[in-house]
Image (spheres, rainbow, N blue to C red):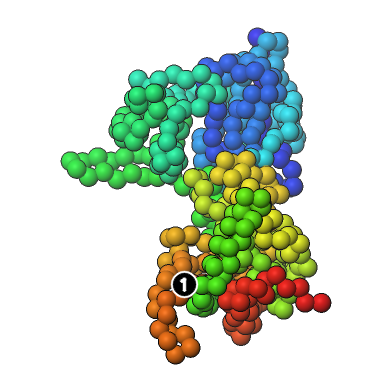
Amino acid sequence: MGIHIIKMPDIGEGIAEVELVGWHVKAGDTVVEDQILADVMTDKATVEVPSPVSGVVVALGGEIGEVMAVGSELIRLEVEGPGNAGLVSASVETAEATPVVEAPKPVTATQASVTQDAPVATTPVASATRSAQVIPMRSAAVQGAIARPTGAKPLASPAVRKRAWELGIELQYVPASGPVGQITHQDLDAYIRQPAASAGDARAVPRATVHDDERIDDIPVIGLRRKIAQKMQEAKRRIPHFTYVEELDVTELENLRSKLNQEYGEDKGKLTLLPFIARAMVLAIRDFPQMNARYDDDAEIIHRYGAVHLGVATQTETGLMVPVVRHADQLDMWQVASETVRLARVARENRATRDELSGSTITLTSLGPLGGIMATPVINHPEVAIVGVNRIVERPVIKDGAVVARKMMNLSSSFDHRVVDGMDAAQFIQRIRTLLECPALLFVEVL
């Protein structure tokens, strides 16, 4: 028997460090070749790391939430034969580069962060010299936890999964008391109150201070939530935002949408409001191409794009993501609607690829029924504009001298004031307003 050390793989594109966001195994587990061992997150995507060999897990090389250097020790396996531990130790002693001795098979992108240009994490990097150490085994479950087969997914409702993510709890190790073996909110409460198995417990469980009826949960900011926080901070730090809010009458638009869905809904699919707004944005960009741009403020270059790659902000259980409808300017509204639904589904299922979650040139965001009367959307750095949709409210409006009931909605849009002047922003939104208030214009191509 020997020890096989699996290093953090080189995911490419000059990435020097990644964040460890999830373990699929624990010490003592038996793994087979190609079995997924861990999830790691780069600035662009979350990828799965498979095992290149079969063996038994001896030790895990990092804590969930830890930022690790490419080439540092990820996991140790006991394998048949001599293993590769001696070769790895020798490479460390001679201070050579640390390529993977037996390279894992290519990782597969499963989820991306907000955009391809998210800032690099600044958490201290784990030293590559730890690859020569045996990391002590960390218990992954507390006493009484129900053992689940390796790779088996625990049963839990979306609400429970969302809460567990926010608390940093791995559901794999939470005892279930539901009627069909599902994990309940009460199970999460009980799990939090249990003491950790040891000081080196690998569970990303918030430390809870309980005194009488008071409790304070310390929730680690890791994984996608960390990337979102970094992205929002970077956007607000680097971009001087200004927000422009305009009211528009969408009564005729809603009437047209209803008729189109009634006429073509079964064959082409139902249209929501977003495809109409996307179409209006595409047409308005023809007159205001400076909105469809990305600003490289380090090089002081504005990259203005001919194609419109529309980012559509999508809320998932793990946080906000922005899948991209590519070449939205070449798609009709039904194609935009279909692609938006597909991208939202794969994003919420954590199956979106890196290409599907990067490269947007302008973003459309909406809170749907929760849209409120206005908002101050944060620009998706390094873009220069974002259009936000608020909720539709039917209320009395004076029209042609009479008080009538109309369906009204606000657009709350933000712009990078370094690149976009206030007058241009106002005219851009007014053009969108004209198109939406007279929706027949959305179907007219002017030569």
Residue 322 to residue 236: above or below: above
Question: How many C-alpha atoms fall within 10 Å of the one at disc 1: few (<14), some, or many (≥20)?
Answer: some
Taking depth in this image into account, of 183 and 444 the one nearest to the observer is 444
Taking depth in this image into account, of 5 and 370 the one nearest to the observer is 370
- Tell me: 192 left or right of 130: left
- Residue pictured at 73% horizontal, 60% vertical: 331
Which residue is outermost to the bottom?
401
Q: Position of residue 25 (x, y in %)?
A: 54, 24
- Residue pictured at 50% horizontal, 27% vertical: 153
Q: Position of residue 416 (x, y in %)?
A: 60, 74
Q: Is residue 290 visible?
A: no
Q: Position of residue 422 (x, y in %)?
A: 59, 83
Residue beneath label 1, please?
407
Which residue is outermost to the right?
447
Q: Quadrant of the N terminus?
A: top right
- Residue pictured at 46% horizontal, 66% vertical: 391
Q: Secondary structure at mark 1?
A: strand
